[in-house]
Image (tube, grey):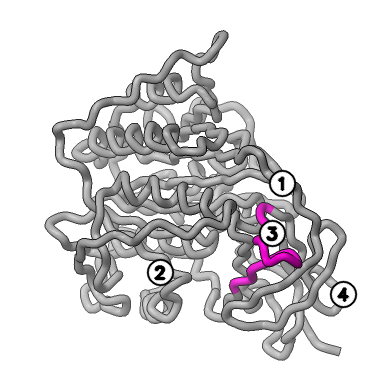
Amino acid sequence: MKRFRAAILLLASGCAYEQGGSSYDMRETRSSSFLRPESPGAPAPVVVPAPSSAPRLRAGETDDNAKFADYLRYFKAYPERNVRKIDITDRTIVTFVDRDGRPVSNAAVRISCGGERVYRGTTTAGGQLMFPPRAVGVDEDVRRFTAEIDGRRATFERGDEVEVTIDVPQAERDEIDVDVAFCLDTTGSMGDEIDAIKRTLRDVASRLDGLHPRPRLRYGLLIYRDHGDEYVTRATDFTKDLGAFLRVLDRVRADGGGDYEEAVSEALCRAVDDLSWRPGDAIRVLFLVGDAPPHTDYQDGFDYSHAMRRALEKGIKIFTLAASGLNDKGEFIWRQLAQFTLGKFIYISYSGASPHHVGEYKENNLDDLMVRAVKGEVESLRAVRPSPRPREGGRGREPDDFREYRGQRD
């Protein structure tokens, strides 16, 4: 019989976690608060802001699953220090389609081998799931797996990218539900960029509201700082009232911080498990925006690697946005979060250059890239050909260029 070890993706240290759900300690403390945007009666009419005269932020993006060979060079070259270097070197991208070739979207998947479950997750709008056998303890000689969706089963072989046809009935969609949340660093180091980023997020939310045909959008916000600040995390739950969301966003200010690392892990855990993400057939996108990596020396019960595992289980795709100042440790974690959940790593660039290990890249306006990220999910659900790629070029460091390691502040 083929051998496999227990499926343990998460490290022993870090936040408490149970397979069936979260066991984070959610007791009320002054370090966290939960807000709801005002929503009495009908939503107030939204006035889409006129284009600002301020220059728009420029950025690049990297899809580390589409350029997986480059990502492996980067992953293997990174000096392993104070990060959760989960082994994804043999990851398989499994695309589930029905008998008509349509993507099986937002479906809960259980993967087993030898009769025991080793993995679970939720497919993306395009029917994809990232499955890393080695990371969950499956032996190298185990080649065949069984996937189960709604009681239907299909087998697939270990490989880079595989397509699995599974006979699952799918209802026709009259409308598409989309939840978009922003997890935003509001420490003092973000002070030089916070207004530009807020302006970008405002433009993104307004432009998404204008998509045609318009999905049923909801917007959420979680802002974070660090322990010892006025707050550690502060959440505004999802609302379909764009005007209320924009008013909350307008009140955000940068302050606090002090040391370099921030409470990113707690923020991610709370964004994934505290916000009321719609279950079932909905698109769920989380943008993480910050300029500093998480503390990996805290014993506060939170771990960013657990948050990304929970995001994959719930079908939340994470797009990470690196503000200026994010060091090598932060880049590794930002890219890890995006790669694991099949999102993209987005980075602000200046004068066509980036300090990150991305080689040549296409530069565009940041708001265009963020809108395209959500629009791409909607198009995947509608099986529409994706939008054209950005045009202008930029340059970053090579994927394996760690001759000057900038992650000393651990």
Tally the numbered discs. 4
Q: Position of residue 353 (x, y in %)?
A: 17, 62
Is residue 144 visible in the rendered structure shown here? yes
Say if 124 sits above or below 218 in the image.
below
Callout in the foreground (3, 1): 1
Q: Which residue is mark 4?
A: 115
Tell me the distance, in whole angstroms, between the alpha carbons under discs 1 and 2. Answer: 48 Å
Q: Nearer the viewer, residue 372 or 174?
A: 174
**98 magenta-colored:** yes
At 45% from the left edge and 38% from the top edge, which residue is drawn? 211
Give me the disc on residue 69.
none
Which is nearer the N-term, disc 1 or disc 2? 2
Tell me the distance, in whole angstroms, between the alpha carbons under discs 3 and 1. Answer: 12 Å
Quadrant of the rendered structure where residue 410 is? bottom left
Under mark 4, the amino acid is Gly
Which is nearer the N-term, disc 3 or disc 1? 3
Q: Secondary structure at mark 4?
A: loop
Under mark 1, the amino acid is Glu
Q: Position of residue 196 (x, y in %)?
A: 23, 37
- Left or right of 105 on screen, residue 1: right
At 29% from the left edge and 48% from the top edge, which residue is drawn? 366
Which is nearer the N-term, disc 1 or disc 4? 4
Which is nearer the N-term, disc 2 or disc 4? 2
Under mark 2, the amino acid is Arg
Q: Which residue is mark 3?
A: 104
Q: Position of residue 362 (x, y in %)?
A: 26, 64
Quadrant of the rendered structure where residue 88 is? bottom right
Q: Residues within 10 Å of mark 2 (few under 14, many from 20)?
A: few
Under mark 3, the amino acid is Val
